[in-house]
Image (cartoon, rainbow, N blue to C red):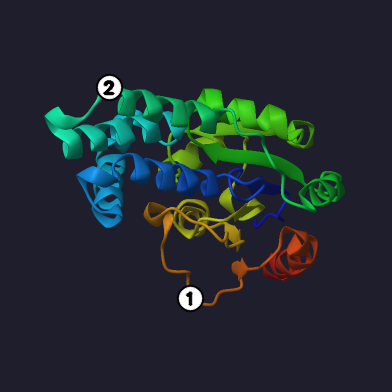
Amino acid sequence: MKKYINTILFDADDTLWENEIFFRQTEQEFCLLLEKFGSKEVILKTLLKSEIETLPIYGFGIKGFMLSMIDTALQLGGENLKSNIISRIMELGKEQLRRPVKVYEGVEDVLNSLQYSYRLVLATKGDPTDQKRKIEASGLKPYFSHIEIMPDKTTRNYEELLKNIDCCPNEIIMVGNSVKSDILPILQLGGRGIYIPCHTTWIHETAECPQESPYFKQIQNFTQIPEILQTMTELNHKSA
């Protein structure tokens, strides 16, 4: 027997609040620190390679990013790298960890309106300590009946999440800014996805949007969610 949609999963970073823009700003300062060791292109290419190679060890988040910056500096600077550059890289990471959380306009109003009709679940990934800090600082925690901080967002991770909240894929809609992490795994499991592009996206998170499908919708603003939900839940009812 088919079931109706009753649960909405929300990504956190760059869906509910700003995040990736701070990585780009830190990268610019990092490139200035290392400018005598290579061009901006070389520095960023080396940094990205280090980040991707160390994801299985460091995971996602600012701490892993900071360690990758140190690794990049050591690769490019070698014996000529001075300790004050390492110290500044450490400080750049700490500064980013202290950034205030800026919730996007309209997010709280939408969550407030949806909490009476759906079970709202926060599904994020990254360093647990930093993610918990941002969740608390956002003021949005009360809207969610369950919060899951995952090491990654693969179909296996989502299967574990759905098991934890006792939910089937055809009962959910996932809202997020990453096609790769938020949308494709959920569609593969049989759920639905709402994609909200962010103006800044880490290259490792990019992927092609799915072909046109009634189970996938792309919108431009968080405030469009209630309207698009109505369309998608109506479709779900008709298919039941």
In the displayed structure, would residue 136 be above or below residue 194? above
Dots 1 and 2: beta carbons under 8 Å? Answer: no
For image coordinates 63% across by 31% down, the residue present is: 134
Judged left or right of residue 3, residue 169 is: left
Q: Position of residue 188 (x, y in %)?
A: 46, 58
Rendered image: mark on residue 126: none
In the displayed structure, would residue 92 be above or below residue 174? above
Judged left or right of residue 85, residue 198 is: right
Of labels 1 and 2, the one closer to you: 2
Query: Residue 146 lies in what quarter of the image?
Result: top right
**Which residue has dot 2 on it?**
83
The front one of 211 and 11 is: 11
For badge 1, the amino acid type reads: Gln
For image coordinates 27% across by 48% down, the residue present is: 43
Callout 1 environment at 10 Å: few (<14), some (14 to 19), or many (20+)? Answer: few
The front one of 93 and 231 is: 93
Q: Position of residue 34 (x, y in %)?
A: 29, 41
Q: Position of residue 221 (x, y in %)?
A: 71, 63
The front one of 191 and 200 is: 200
- Label 2's element? helix
- Label 1's element? loop
On the question of residue 217 being in view, the answer is yes
Q: Residue furthest left?
A: 79
Query: Residue 67 lies in what quarter of the image?
Result: top left
On the question of residue 164 being in view, the answer is no
Judged left or right of residue 62, residue 82 is: left
Does label 1 or label 2 sit earlier along the sequence?
Answer: 2
**Which residue has dot 1 on it?**
211
